[in-house]
Amino acid sequence: MNAPTAQSTRTLESLSTVAMTKSFGGVTAVDGATVTFQEGKVNGLIGPNGSGKTTFFNCVTGMIKPDSGEVRYRGQAITGKSPDRIARAGIGRSFQLCRVFPRMTVMENLLVAVRSTSIRRQLRSAHDPEELERARSWLRRVGIDHLEHAEARNLSYGQQKLLELAGVLMGEPDTIMLDEPAGGVNPALIGRIATLVRELNEEGKTFIIVEHNMEMVMSLCDHVVVFDRGRQIAEGTPEIIQQDPRVLEAYLGV
């Protein structure tokens, strides 16, 4: 039996930031945040309301530019790059407030979510049997294939979250960032989302999940980062995080 190599035994770095800062007026939302997420793991990012988690997500995915600091993905600097370039690098994301096209069908939403930004390519994909089947396969995975021809506005909020996730997966990202996937979703659909995350992680996808549902975070995540006032205050396994006095102080003021 071969001995494990140094590379196989060390934790690989997926997405990381160094001293990243973002302010809005006189309010510092992200304050010198240095964070490392683990490749091939389900990573959680938690913290009290207003601790900077969504702003952090927006900075690392190119939605807004940080004022200073660095964002790196698999060793390459991606600081300040456009969202489409970051997506092409292999990072997909969902949003805290679900983003779908309400007057388009479920299938049409998936076809315009394809990584290519060419409208001509998107229109052509509507008649591409391979692209249609790929979209249907993701609809089956998330459990809404029976709604293929329904307009997105007629879906429940939880079903729209599943549609948004299917759209992210259509881009074939290696790292998937989910912003409150359980927010506003009934318990049955939360369970479906958690099961899908586990399955995709076993297939090699890395996840970074912002979530207020602590039961979901602690049961699903391998590695948890805790934010307070715009920066990391703790990291570790769920077991370690639940016993960390800094985390208790941030959440409970004790």
Image: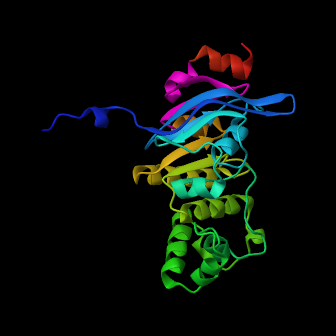
Q: Quadrant of residue 8?
A: top left
Q: Quadrant of residue 77?
A: top right
The image quadrant where one finds the C terminus is: top right
Q: Is residue 173 left or right of residue 83?
A: left
Tag count: 0
- At 73% from the left and 45% from the top, the residue drawn is 64
Q: Residue furthest bottom?
A: 127
Task: Report x, y in % for residue 213.
Answer: 66, 39
Q: Residue furthest left?
A: 1
Q: How is the image coloured?
A: rainbow
- At 55% from the left and 58% from the top, the residue drawn is 88
Q: Is residue 232 magenta?
A: yes
- At 59% from the left and 60% from the top, the residue drawn is 168
Classify 213 as above or below 114.
Answer: above
Which range of residues does the magenta coloring cover?
Answer: 221-243
Q: Nearer the viewer, residue 148 or 231?
A: 231
Task: Report x, y in % for residue 165.
Answer: 61, 59
Classify 125 as above or below 223.
Answer: below
Task: Report x, y in % for residue 111.
Answer: 61, 74
Q: Quadrant of residue 55?
A: top right
Q: Is residue 165 magenta?
A: no
Q: Is residue 220 visible?
A: no
Q: Nearer the viewer, residue 81 or 236?
A: 81
Q: Nearer the viewer, residue 99 or 55?
A: 55
Q: Is residue 77 left or right of residue 187?
A: left
Q: Residue furthest right?
A: 25
Task: Report x, y in % for residue 58.
Answer: 70, 45
The image quadrant where one finds the N terminus is: top left
